[in-house]
Image (spheres, grey):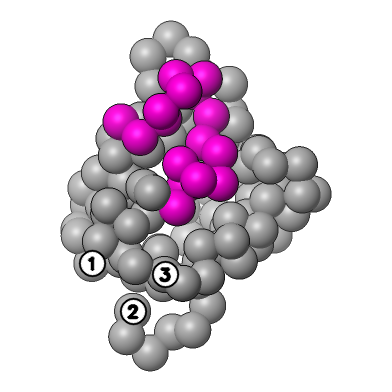
Amino acid sequence: LQTSTDPLERLRAACLARGAQGIKGLSILFKIIDDDGNKKLSMDEFKKGVNEFGLHLTTIAKAFAKLDRNGDGQITVDDLRGVYTVKSHPKYMNGEWSEDQVLRQFLDCFDYGIHKDGI
């Protein structure tokens, strides 16, 4: 975390530093900061969440943009493909899940309730 300059790697390292609940904790925080209740995070909501998570990045826009590969303001499975590697995921390694299934499961960590749209 201290040596990385890549904003996405810094976010990833901060989650991992919090142990198994790191991503889950970030997910819960993002649900709380969904100010307009539309079950999607705007750039402002994303910035707020990352700052409240304790990762004070001055390059939040770069982290979001790195994930939002097509630039539409939303992060989807297609955006994550090639950015988030699934090769070490146990269910991918044993052939149980495809790359898309692993990526969707990752996005589902940020969805909640019955509204799981993968965005």
The residue identified by callout 3 is 57
Compared to 106, does 1 lie above or below?
below
Q: Which mark is residue 17?
A: 1
Type of amino acid under label 2 = Leu
Type of amino acid under label 3 = Leu
Span colored in magenta: 32-47
Secondary structure of the residue carrying tag 3 is loop
Q: Position of residue 22 (x, y in %)?
A: 26, 52
Q: Position of residue 36 (x, y in %)?
A: 46, 23
Q: Residue at x 56, y 39 (%)?
A: 42
Q: Are marks 2 and 1 in contact (CB under 8 Å)?
A: yes
Determine the image quadrant of residue 64: bottom right
Residue 42 belongs to the span the image colors magenta: yes
Q: Which mark is residue 1?
A: 2
Which is more toward the observer, 110 or 63?
A: 63
Q: Quadrant of the C terminus?
A: top right
Q: Are marks 1 and 3 in contact (CB under 8 Å)?
A: no
Compared to 92, does 66 lie above or below?
below
* In this rendering, position of residue 111 left or right of residue 117: left
Mark before the other along the chain sequence, 2 or 1:
2
Secondary structure of the residue carrying tag 2 is loop
The span from disc 2 to disc 3 (Cα, nearest Å) is: 11 Å
